[in-house]
Amino acid sequence: MASPSRIAVVEDEADLREVVVDYLRLQGFAVFACADSTALDAVLAGGDVDVVLLDLNLPREGGLSIARRLRALPRPPGIIMVTALGETVDRVVGLEVGADDYIGKPFELREMLARLRSVLRRRVAVPVAPSPVAAPPEAPVGPRSTTPPAPAARATHLRFAGFTLCQDSRRLLDPTQREVPLTTMEVDLLLILATHPGQVLSRERLLVLARGKDADPLDRSIDVRITRLRRKIEADPANPRLIRTLRGQGYVFTPDGTPDGA
């Protein structure tokens, strides 16, 4: 039986924290209640967590600072930023520092659960590299076999502008083969764009492809995430050539390379 997902709830309002923690435990999650960053650090010292529900306005160390630290971890968790209703600027900044999603207070517990499950679905573990396999013995001298070779495995890498996007491991390598840090949602968006080259994808379509039934048609966070992606892959983010905006239509990915095996 699979272990339950580990969720940290970082909230300084004790009543709200207790309600959220109890609700998530009833849903089968392993939940850790944290009143501040110190409590969260103690939880992380005992093992990784899958998702952090992170209040923006915390005593001592604020949510934005904590989010930056979480993103720098070797195995960063998903982050859902919890903000006061109407704090648009803070939400945008939260997405800028790497939050996967946000939810405004007051919120419905079912909505929070839907967003949490959406982030969990998008988290895919990086597979362990296989052990080296010994080379097969040389074929004996004689007539060549007439059996056709087995078909090649489907390519799992996409290449563009010197970058390599690994579909299985969900890693992006730059032209020097260094890994480019991406959030879960950024990987989702880049995979969607890179596998639909030359196609105009509206914001609504991108949301549906990335989040499925949990997509909010009024969600404008796609623009923020596209901006973040451009900063990481464009030579000149102010004049993007890979992810272009078509006013009134959406975005189109125009790579200078093609998928392996194309």
Image: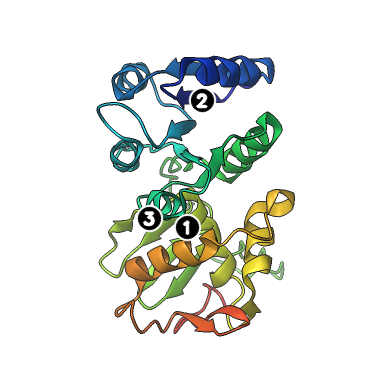
Name the image quarter holding residue 61: top left
Q: Is residue 9 above or below residue 79?
A: above
Name the image quarter holding residue 155: bottom right
Q: Amino acid at mark 1?
A: Glu
Front residue (pair 260, 95): 95
Mark 2 secondary-structure assignment: strand
Q: Which residue is mark 3?
A: 96
Mark 1 surroundings within 10 Å by alpha-carbon count, few (fewer than 14), some (14 through 19), many (20 or more): some
Residue drawn where x is 45% and y is 45% of the image: 133
Mark 3 secondary-structure assignment: helix
Q: Do we see residue 156 in this rendering?
A: no
Mark 3 surroundings within 10 Å by alpha-carbon count, few (fewer than 14), some (14 through 19), many (20 or more): some
Which percent across, then down, holds residue 127?
A: 48, 42
The answer to whether 101 appears left or right of 144 in the picture is left
Q: CA distance from mark 2 to mark 1?
A: 21 Å
Quadrant holding the N terminus:
top right
Q: Amino acid at mark 3?
A: Glu
Q: CA distance from mark 2 to mark 3?
A: 22 Å
Mark 1 secondary-structure assignment: helix
Q: Are marks 2 and 1 in contact (CB under 8 Å)?
A: no
Q: Amino acid at mark 2?
A: Ile
Q: Are marks 3 and 1 in contact (CB under 8 Å)?
A: no
Which percent across, then down, holds residue 183?
A: 43, 51
Q: Which residue is mark 2?
A: 7
Identity of the residue furthest to the right in this view: 213
Q: Which residue is mark 1?
A: 186
- Tell me, what colour scheme is on the image? rainbow
Q: Earlier in the sequence, mark 2 or mark 3?
A: 2
